[in-house]
Image: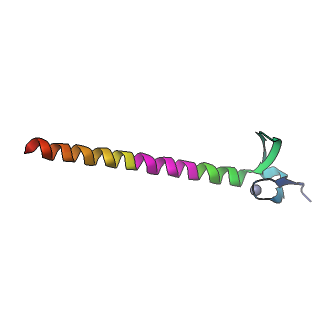
Amino acid sequence: MSQTAYCYHCGVHHPIEEMRQIYTKGGKRRRCIKSIEATKAETAQRDAFGQRMTEMNKAAAQAKQRILNSQ
Ligand SMILES: [Zn+2]
């Protein structure tokens, strides 16, 4: 039987091979790779969304400027 460790993120035990030891303000803790990857993916998605919105706003501002300039 494989060893398990408590995952502070999920609040359950996972097999130790799926865990990463991380350092927090509270000290050393274990968290599963799955939850770390999920958090990373969410952050990347949020960043990509923010980037897209910035570009859209910029494009919209430029389009408006072009219209104003052509009048
Ligand atoms: Zn977990």
Residue 5 placement, left or right of 70: right
Predominant secondary structure in magenta? helix
Quadrant of the image for the C terminus?
A: top left
Residue 42: percent from left, percent from top = 57, 53
Residue 44 highlighted magenta (yes or no): yes
Q: Position of residue 6 (x, y in %)?
A: 85, 54
Q: Which residue is drawn at 38% across and 45% down?
A: 54
Q: Which residue is drawn at 89% across and 56% down?
A: 2
From which residue to which does the magenta span run? 42-52
Q: Does residue 52 appear to the left or right of 32 in the view shown?
A: left
Count how many numbered circles sit on residues in the image: 0
Ligand 1, by image quadrant, is bottom right
How was this image coloured?
Answer: rainbow
Name, please, the residue furthest toward the left. 71
Viewer-proximal residue among 25 and 15: 25
Q: Which residue is drawn at 64% across and 54% down?
A: 38
